[in-house]
Image (cartoon, rainbow, N blue to C red):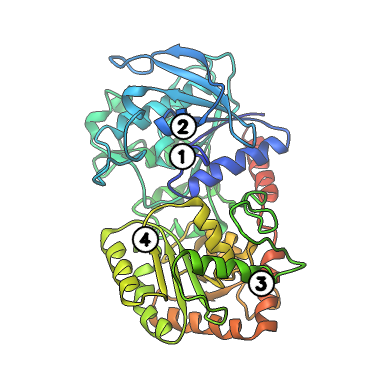
Amino acid sequence: MKILFVTSEVHPLLKTGGLADVSASLPAALQGLGEDVRLLIPGYSQVLDKLESKRTVATFGVFSGQPEVRLLSAKMPQTGVPVYVLDAPLYFCRVAGPYQYELGGDWPDNAMRFGMLSKVAAMLGSASSPIGWQADIVHCNDWQSGLAPAYLQLTQAAHAKSVMTIHNMAFQGNFDSNWLKPLDLPQSCFDMHGVEFHGQLSFLKAGLHYADRIVTVSPTYAREIQTTEMGYGLQGLLAVRNGDVSGILNGIDEDEWDPATDPHLTAHYDVGDLAPKAEGKRALQQRLGLEVNAQSPLLGVVSRLTYQKGLDMLLECLPKLLDGGAQLVVLGSGEADLEKRYLQLAERYPGRVSVTVRFDEALSHQIMAGADIFLMPSRFEPCGLNQMYGMRYGTPPVVRRTGGLADSVADASLPDGTGFVFDEADAAMLYRVIESAIGSYRDKKQFERIQLNGMRRDVGWRSSAQQYRDLYRMIV
């Protein structure tokens, strides 16, 4: 099958979250199964700078009144997956992030930017493809490519089938209805059985309405998004399309995330020898200015600092845990108030708390290896990858029983337990489960059992990629 995987970010070219990791590893896994899979991504400055041996394969217009764009062809670093880059400098070659400018607001023309990405995706999946290659499947990811299924359905030409993957229902891409005309969308599609959502043009709703199949990134999340609490107003549409909704758990790149070979680590280890993990902990404590103490349980957080991630609840627990002898390392950025409160905590507990407010790929690997316990107390989590990284690195996660966390982490009370699971989004309950995890940490034999269970768990992409392939074949 010819599969076009459409995404707004991909590691290692550009990354703001887990979507970038999935966009790198799932296409590679599908290619490993023998499929003809190609990526389509925007031509951000960072992408153009990092891709080598680019060549122009087409130049064409997308929307009337807009400059022509170029489609560049290259290969992804490491995996060699073919990638098409939408080179539209007016819209993508900008300072700051892919979705927001430096002060944190959304780019005001995001509708045009990602409408263009969606339209080009549809062109590559139809008889009007400008490159002599036409996809059988256009696989869209999140709202940024949500208009592609609409463009495919609204064209008269022979076209590909479409799959819409929801990585997070909370981000919907809702814009003023005045964008309909510039984006070449007919007025007839602006109703409840189309792209309209509370008087706005919704990219995500467009994808959910027009796609041939809808996928979420874990079986539990597929059920959760059909409830009032987690559906963000789209639960009715999803309930109507229930038979077209699947949940396929994400995997991780087991080559990149391997403590036996990870180039970011000072000491390597595996299930046969966990002893060098202690050296990783010592190196992490030294690097971040923490007291070098092998006995202090080191708690790790690598996350967006947001309410969704439950990190406000964690703040309530931390003084007692730190006063009890624990250490904490935090890497991430997000809501200004949470950033400020975590930085204040680090000032209050010098030598016991380290907070790094930015993204740092190498440090994230070192935290996964050097921490003893990984904390991920999300209020909701469509899938999550960090809990799998933690298990892979022998750093058992503390997670709430929701979404992909429920599907990927087995509680330590079970014979095959890989982490510590709690139910209610409550600070007191979170404190109790972290205390339980620390208690297990002090019981070396019990803790090693949990570590080894996690390290042996299959968290790779092969099974999930096969499920995607089966889904593609069914709809084609």
The circle drawn on residue 451 is: 3
The residue under the point 45% across, 68% down is: 329
SS assignment at label 4: loop
Q: In this view, does 175 lie above or below 264?
A: above
> Nearest the camera: 224 or 97?
97
Label at residue 218:
none
Q: Identify the residue under disc 2.
A: 47
| Amino acid type, callout 1 | Leu
Tags 3 and 4 touching, CB below 8 Å: no
Residue 14, label in figure = 1
User: Circle 3 — which element?
Assistant: helix
Q: Nearer the viewer, mark 4 or mark 2?
A: 2
The residues bearing labels 3 and 2 have C-alpha atoms spaced at a distance of: 37 Å
- In contact (CB < 8 Å): disc 1 and disc 2: yes
Q: Where is residue 15 in the image (x, y as percent from the top left)?
A: 46, 44
Q: Within the image, what quadrant is residue 82 found in?
A: top right
In terms of sequence position, does the residue under pointer 4 or pointer 2 come before the other? Answer: 2
**Tag 4: residue type?**
Leu
Q: Distance between the residues labelled 3 and 4?
A: 26 Å
Identify whether 229 is placed above or below 14: below
Report which quarter residue 343 is drawn in.
bottom left
Specify which label sits upstream in the sequence, 1 or 3. 1
Residue type, numbered disc 2: Val
Q: Which amino acid does label 3 sit on?
A: Gln
Q: Nearer the viewer, residue 266 or 202?
A: 266
Instruction: Classify mark 1: residues with Cα within 10 Å, few (<14), some (14-19) or many (20+).
Output: some
